[in-house]
Image (cartoon, helix red, strand yellow):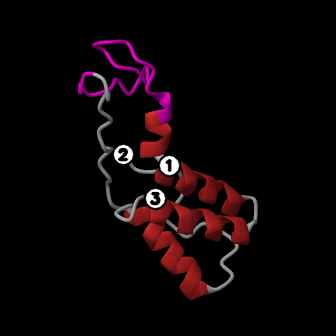
Amino acid sequence: MSTVSLPEVLCPLCRVPADRQSLGCPSCREDLSVLFRLRYAGRIDYNRALDALAAGDEALALGLLHRAVAAEPGLEPARELLESLSVAGSAGAVPSGQEGDTPSE
């Protein structure tokens, strides 16, 4: 599985890279959690799609994967899983190597 680097979130007030642990700006202490949610929406949907597949809800998983790819076209794990589900038809399970969370740095 390919490794995907995490996009940086910059504070809109002071342009300092946000702290991923606190979801805030280390300079001005602005809460940037909404910006993180927007920036990582594709990855969140990808992980929800994995959960849906594990629960047997392929229709929901396909919808979430389409949304993940639309939000972040370069998210290869989501693209690959979407392709494999589209080719395989009714997969019913997560393909080998796709278990777990979205890859990070």
Please say if the residues under marks 3 and 1 sit with CB atoms less than 8 Å apart.
Answer: yes
In the structure shown, which secondary structural element does the residue marked by tag 1 occupy? helix
Amino acid on which disc 3 is placed? Ala
**Camera-nearest residue between 34 and 69:** 34
- The crowding category of the residue bearing disc 3, from other C-alpha atoms within 10 Å (few below 14, some 14 to 19, many at least 20), is some
**Callout 1: 10 Å neighbours few (<14), some, many (20+)?**
some
Tell me the quadrant of the picture where the N terminus can be found: bottom left
Q: Secondary structure under badge 2?
A: loop
Tell me what residue is drawn at x 25 percent, y 22 percent.
14
> 2 and 97: which one is in front?
2
Q: Which residue is mark 2?
A: 104
**Is 23 part of what is drawn in magenta?**
yes
Q: Earlier in the sequence, mark 2 or mark 3?
A: 3
Quarter of the figure with the C terminus? top left
Disc 1 residue type (three-letter): Ala
* Rendered location of residue 51, percent (x, y): 66, 54
Residue 74 visible in the displayed image: yes
| Chain part drawn in magenta | 14-34
Between the residue at mark 1 and the residue at mark 2, the CA separation in whole angstroms equals 14 Å
